[in-house]
Image: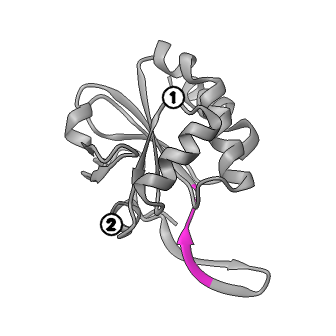
Amino acid sequence: MSHLSVGDPAPAFSAPNEKGEILTLDQFKGKKIVLYFYPKDDTPGCTAEACSIRDNYQRFLNQGYVVLGVSPDKEDKHQKFIDKYELPFSLLADSEHKILKDYGVWGLKKFMGREYMGVMRTTFVIDEKGKIAEIISKVNTKDHADQIFDLMEIAS
């Protein structure tokens, strides 16, 4: 579970996107960001989540948001995922788990009686000043975009 709270400064990050370009939190200063963490490209839940955001992407842009996804997958896998589902936003490769750990979303998971280290599916909404405005830890993958918009409406 994330150790971060609403109002905390968002941890700085620097990671390659699907094209190998290094993206940093500082590059988005003055912009609102939806930073979503997910376990793995091209799996059912992660695909549903990405497609929900894709299908509502213009709405995010209209409200002034940059959308970035983060997973441990490598850049080439991200590019295949983007191409396959026509995702209009960048995906950051965090194979060393640095960003995942900084945001407190890398930890012990349990599935069918087995324990393993993995990504806790979580979304952070970051305001223009670089502070965490919202944290969604119980992600509804199929309707994640609506879940984000509903939360943002309540917060404003």
Residue displayed at 68% across by 79% down: 110
For the residue pair 43 and 130, the one nearer the viewer reads as 43
Q: Which residue is mark 2?
A: 98
Total tally of numbered discs in the picture: 2
Q: CA distance from mark 2 to mark 1?
A: 24 Å
Relative side of 59 to 2, left or right: right
- Range shown magenta: 116-121
Name the kind of residue labelled 1 in the image: Pro
| Circle 2 crowding by C-alpha within 10 Å: few under 14, some 14–19, many from 20 | some
Q: Which mark is residue 114?
A: none
Relative side of 56 to 135, left or right: right
Q: Which mark is residue 88?
A: 1
State yes or no: residue 118 in magenta. Answer: yes
Name the kind of residue labelled 2 in the image: Lys
Residue displayed at 60% across by 83% down: 116
In the rendered view, tell whether residue 53 sits above or below residue 71: above
Asked whether residue 139 is in view, the answer is: no
For the residue pair 138 and 61, the one nearer the viewer reads as 61
